Image (cartoon, rainbow, N blue to C red):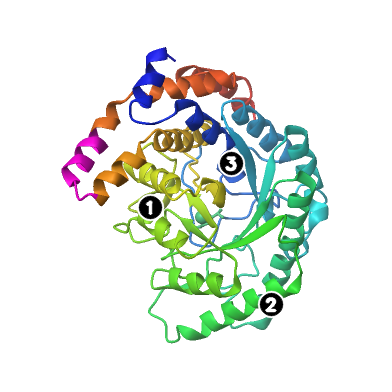
Amino acid sequence: MRKQVKEIYASYGVDVYEALRKLKATKISLHCWQLDDVKGFEGEGDLTGGIQTTGNYPGRARNFKELTQDLDKALTYIPGSKKINLHAIYQADKIVERCDVGPEQFKSWVKYAKERGLGLDYNPTIFSHKMLKDGMSLSSPDEEVRKYWIKHCINGLKITEMFGKELGQKSLMNIWIPDGLKEVPADRLGPRMRLKDSLDQILKGYKYDKRVMDVSVESKVFGIGVESYTTGSNEFYLNYASSRKICCLLDTGHFHPTENVADKISSMFAFYNKLAFHVSRPVRWDSDHVLKLNDDLQDVADELVKCDGLSRSYIGLDYFDASINRVVALVVGARNMEKALLKALLTPWNLLKEAQDKGDHTRVLALQEEIKTLPWSEVWEEYLKRQEMVNDAQMYKELKQYEESVLLKR
Ligand code: RNT
Ligand code: ZN
């Protein structure tokens, strides 16, 4: 980085080194499911629950060994503090029936994470399974179905607690269910009351240690095949989380396309101390495209920084593209998240806020546009250099070699 760069930012009251420090301390949870098209290790069942991967690019990771091999490769190109986000379907040891998946099944993952100084997050997997009846799980009218998934989630609390304890980093258990209806419901309240009861049973089912973990609930507007009604809507979970003192998780693909997800962040922080995210890129629907460094992503990063939310947020990535090299997809998306955060950290928010409060909206507009051409990319190169990581061009070259020597041989 040229010496000048530091001075340029200092002239706006921004300390480049402080920005680099904050960025490095911000944890990003890398979703393992980009590497295997959300298939998991249980067998070759179809992906259900209204989510979809498309494409059949060669080289998909098929088991624990291949997935961790790809993760290791990806990790060498992703700077900053990292966690790995797991799902129940990635049980690595002595595979058992889904409702019985417990800490035993994740011993190898804990060992893996420990050896690399990583944190782990967890998600019960409530899709791609025969115990979903008519697409319903925790809100099903069938008591057996509800019981099955309640048990699965209670076991999930134990797994997440183990992650938090063993790794010395707080762990998040996020609950997302696909429950919904294709057609206009005859009864909207019934499923929601059942979901409320199921979640209460889960939270009461195991007294987890709040010092080492948090629980979040992820809302959604609709899914494929369940276009008319989603039990776990935004309003449902906002109220549930606030009354039960747990976290909300905002997935950036789970709202109407014209809704601004970034705008929700400050409203949430006005009432919640913590917030969780799945950062994704919806294209016309919740398509889970790989993150691009676009305005939507930048807006989310900006709001997180402005609200002083970096240390109060669980930032997880959530996209899955099976039509391109999956390791490149994971790395490019993760690097984009980091770049957006860096740009946000290099922004003179104090000057901008001051101008807004004075009613000087001309200044706000001019300054917002002025800073877009500041040399942030040199700071990015510096960030990579400090962590002994190669630049984007070299990263791509090396990952293409990895494709040749490893992925294409699978
Ligand atoms: C689905 C949700 C959910 C999943 C992952 C695999 O719409 O976003 O979070 O994508 O858990
Ligand atoms: Zn999600």
Q: Which residues are magenta?
A: 358-369
Seen from the viewer's position, the closer of residues 263 and 201 is 263
> Measured from the top left, where is residue 291 in percent x and y?
43, 40
Seen from the viewer's position, the closer of residues 237 and 326 is 237
Give the mark, 2 or 1, whose residue is nearer the N terminus: 2
Q: Quick one: SS at disc 3?
A: strand
Picture quarter containing residue 210? bottom right
Picture quarter containing residue 293? top left
- Please report the residue visible at 65 percent of the width from the left and 77 percent of the height from the top: 200
Residue 74 seen anywhere in this rendered image of the structure: yes
- Residue 88: within the magenta? no
> Measured from the top left, where is residue 141 in percent x and y?
59, 83
Give the mark, 3 or 2, whose residue is nearer the N terminus: 3
Q: Which mark is residue 262?
A: 1
Question: In this image, 295 relative to 44: left or right?
Answer: left
* Residue placed under numbered mark 3 in the picture: 27
Q: Cα distance, mark 3 to mark 2?
A: 31 Å
* Residue placed under numbered mark 2 in the picture: 201
